[in-house]
Amino acid sequence: MAQPTNLFDTYDSVGIREDLSDMIYNVDPSATPFYSKSSKTKAKNTLVEWQTQALRGSAVNAHIEGDATSADAVTPTVRLGARTQIFKNAVVVSDTDEAVDNAGRAKELAYQTLLIAKEQKLDIEKALFANQGNVGGSNVLARKTGGVPSWLITNVNFQNGNGGANPTGDGSNARTDDGTATAFSQAKFDDVMQSIWEEGGKSDTVYLSAFQMNVALGFTGNNNQRSAVQAGDETVVKSLAVYVTPWGTVQFEPSRENRSQDVFILQDNMWECAVLRGTKNVALAKNGDNTTRQVTTELALCSKNEKANGAIYDNTTS
């Protein structure tokens, strides 16, 4: 049917409010499992130092009755250090934009500041897993904190047929990736788990990419993988939450921020983030008809005992 004569409809109307939802859907990944789990301590300088102590190996300890006592050899502590890294982001919003009625948020400046704070947390997670050593910095070079790979040398599995090599192990330099990658496997994983146990470690979390997580879903063993169909809703469940071995029980934690070729088996309480400046946003000086806010964090990653952790490197990623 045709419209009545002179009907005024929405095609003629001016000033109809847009149907714009007042909810902004943030689909960007924001999970930072390693940074969130690591303990936080207070740093007092840009160089954070600590000491580690190793016990001697066990020995037959039997003595003749009444014999003279001699002192055991003393193992000195090892002094280690890490540099703090400055994470900084800023947002500038015009004063007009701050004044208008924006859909989905009360104030534009507060909303944009929250976004860059979330993004900065992702940057921190990425830096903690980065294959980089500590950098002292200068007036022309930014300081950097050594990532997890710069500390691990004892319980590692990697290819060395085409250049792969460990770092020094004191956080001062990066490891050398091998030119030939091989597939992540249950055999590699169990080997590193056993090595950690033999060194006295109690690893509890495995950090790995989505690709390597899919490989791990194929690990054999009834105690680690569940696959079921629930009647009624026809939901298929397939997950790998906890992996139980004779060498310990670990939780698998998919991570978007560590390199896909790296799999880390860590004891979380053996890592600390020494925070010199906690995450804070400050208003910078006005420079015209706008407002700028800056978000900063400064911290260092500290490895309390690398022997409690392990890694599997040079894994294929496709």
Image (cartoon, rainbow, N blue to C red):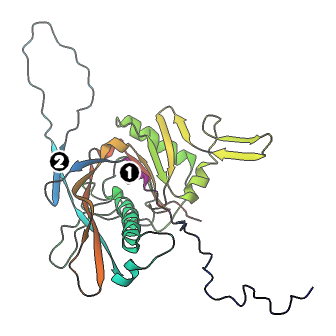
Taking the view exactly as shown, the residue that stands out farthest to the bottom is 6
Name the element at disc 1. Answer: helix
x and y, in percent, of residue 244 in the image? 53, 35
Taking the view exactly as shown, the residue that stands out farthest to the top is 65
Query: Number of marks in the image?
Result: 2
Give the CA separation, mark 2 to mark 1: 22 Å
Q: Is residue 26 left or right of residue 9?
A: left
Q: Which residue is drawn at 45% across and 62% down?
A: 257
Vertical position of residue 242 compared to residue 173: above or below: above
x and y, in percent, of residue 77 in the image? 15, 41
Front residue of 143/218: it is 143
- Where does the magenta region start and end? 28-37
Residue 273 sits inside the magenta stretch:
no
Indicate the quadrant containing the N terminus: top left, top right, bottom left or bottom right.
Answer: bottom right
Q: Which residue is drawn at 34% across and 56% down?
A: 148
Instruction: Return the residue at label 1.
Output: 36
Please, what is the three-letter code of the amino acid marked with disc 2? Trp
x and y, in percent, of residue 174 in the image? 32, 63
Instruction: Return the residue at label 2.
Output: 50
The mark nearer the N terminus, 2 or 1, is 1
x and y, in percent, of residue 134 in the image? 24, 63
Which numbered dot is residue 56? none
Quick one: label 2, few (<14), some, or many (20+) residues within 10 Å?
few
Q: Which residue is drawn at 61% across and 54% down?
A: 214
Front residue of 42/11: it is 11
Q: In this view, does 66 lie to the left or right of 311?
A: left
Judge whether residue 183 can be spotted in this image: no
Name the element at disc 2. Answer: strand
Q: In this view, does 95 lie to the left or right of 142?
A: right
Vertical position of residue 1 compared to residue 147: above or below: below
Please, what is the three-letter code of the amino acid marked with disc 1? Ser
Disc 2 or disc 1, which is closer to the eye? 1
